[in-house]
Image: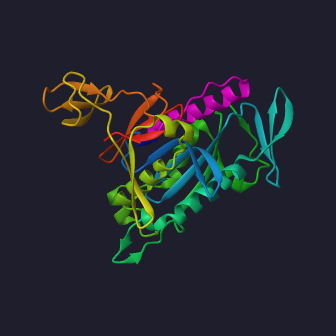
Amino acid sequence: MILKDMSLKNTISPTAKAGQEQETNVAFFLRRAFKDHPRIFVINDYKFTYNDETAQIDHLIVYPYGFILMESKSITGGVKVNSYGEWSRSFNNNWTGMPSPIKQVELQQRLLRELLFENSPRILTKLLGIKQQYFGFRCWDNICVVSSNAIIDRETMPRNVSEQLVKSEFLVDKLNKIMNLKGPVGRLLSITDSRPKFSDSELISITEFLMSQIQIKAEILEEKRPAIEAIVHNNVESIVKITSRLQCKSCGEPSDYTALCGRYGYYIKCNKCTTNTAMKINCGSCQSKNAKVSKLGEKYFLNCGDCEASERLL
């Protein structure tokens, strides 16, 4: 299931354009493989802040056994990594050093873990009053995804780095190997898989929490965002409630309708006049038309590709 698509930006420099093209390419492979999977959640271009630090994860997967963070790099020449973990790349036969994408995604993972650990009691449930293993014993994996036409020198590359480096065209195979999701029969027959597993309700709770952390420009939020009521209980903000802006295009009915999904995307069917109305509305924060609807469980969200605001529609 895709919770957030790529946020395309008006890039100017060739380097920025190439980077965005690589991220878009990776997002395409993820969408094609997992858009209909009920227990694999994909968040592209995930930006969040915790403890006065901000991280931007190119692609994040949440699945029953844990998390996978991906860093996309547009490398169309050669790439080498020495025994010290130092990276270099070639362009027009000229080699230059580059920051380690693995180290970069490790820092992102550290901040994400701290965010989730801090909020474990409100995200995950208890079993018979006993705390679950929360996030510490879950699977945490990092991947660097480079262009499919890159030339990777794996002969001299440290093994642990090579295991985390993959070309775009082989990404889905790599992810399926990491996640190792078996069918019901496979799970019953497997006696070696001792990984702790999130329940379906916990997966929904985790992804709802992560989506709620997406950064919104403060000045836009203050001036243009529709009515938001924060429900606070025992000093813990539990949920954000947003008044829906959907209404029937024919009779204007603001609430008596049913949300459905059809060939052309999400829409509402009016229970009074039976008219179908597409869920195509502008962002409530910046009024951009670059906003898409996503569904999580029985809830619908509008995610803006420009200001990155996310609002609950239903």
Q: What stretch is highlighted in magenta?
A: 4-33
Query: Toward the viewer: 293 or 80?
Result: 293
Q: Is the magenta stretch mostly helix, strand or loop?
A: helix
Rendered-image quadrant of the C terminus: top left
Write the residue at 66% across / 26% down: 17
Q: Which residue lies furthest to the left in this view?
A: 272
Q: Is 265 part of what is drawn in magenta?
A: no
Residue 100's spot in the image, x, y percent? 75, 47
Rendered-image quadrant of the N terminus: top left
Residue 164's spot in the image, x, y percent? 65, 50
Residue 193's spot in the image, x, y percent? 46, 66
Write the residue at 52% across / 45% down: 214
| Residue 195 visible in the current orientation | no
Marks counted in the figure total: 0
Residue 235 location, quadrant: bottom left
Tell me: 198 left or right of 258.
right
Write the residue at 36% across / 74% down: 127
Q: How is the image coloured?
A: rainbow
Write the residue at 41% across / 39% down: 35
